[in-house]
Image: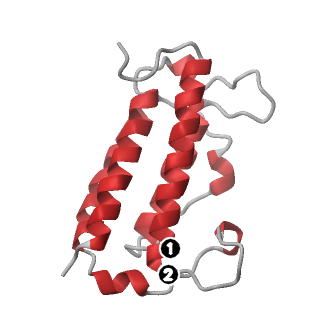
Amino acid sequence: MPGEARHFAVVLERIVRRALDQFKDISESDLNRSLALPESNSAFVLATHLIGSAEYWVLQLAGGHDVQRDRLAEFRAIGTGATLAARYERWLAAMQSLLPTLPDEQLDRVVQVEPSYHPSLDETPMTLRDALLHAIEHCALHQGHLELTRQLLGYAPAGAQ
């Protein structure tokens, strides 16, 4: 009987929808503009990296989808908010059709993570549960980066109008 992964889905959806709110009303030029801060990223880059990682950690590792992620390209990405928002909505739909149906016993399955993506400090094999927890942690981190970037671009906090 599915249960635990359903909770992961609720948290991931909340985080990703908040991230979507951060960039959906930003002008295209601001969305792609780098901040005048060392080693900062544009809102588009942050949002692209967030969803790229979510696709990998959730759809590929939990669902077996081949997402063809190019992590380095995420940090050079430019584009439109509409295209990015559509990608977010596709991910949300795919995630919601996958995670709530995932049997709890699947969460103990060991997953094969790209060596350069491995987020743990030890050599312990990563379970699917670990991968989903990492997805939550990583998405929340970059959602916060998006909030700050939005404000540094001169926009009011999302939903504050």
Q: Is residue 120 above or below residue 23?
A: below
| Residue under the image location 50 percent in, 86 percent down | 110
What is the secondary structure assignment of the residue under circle 1? helix
The C terminus is located in which quarter? top left
Give the colour scheme shown.
secondary structure
Q: Amino acid at mark 2?
A: Thr
Badge 1: residue crowd in 10 Å (few <14, some 14–19, many ≥20): some
Which residue is under mark 1?
A: 130
Q: Picture coordinates of residue 66 (x, y %)?
A: 46, 70
Q: Is residue 6 above or below residue 74?
A: below
In the image, 109 versus 95, the foreground residue is 109
Which residue is under mark 2?
A: 127
Indicate the quadrant where residue 41 lies: top right
Q: Picture coordinates of residue 11 (x, y %)?
A: 35, 54
Q: Picture coordinates of residue 28 (x, y %)?
A: 51, 20
In the image, 45 versus 120, the foreground residue is 120
| Residue under the image location 60 percent in, 17 percent down | 153
The N terminus is located in which quarter? bottom left
Q: Are marks 2 and 1 in contact (CB under 8 Å)?
A: yes
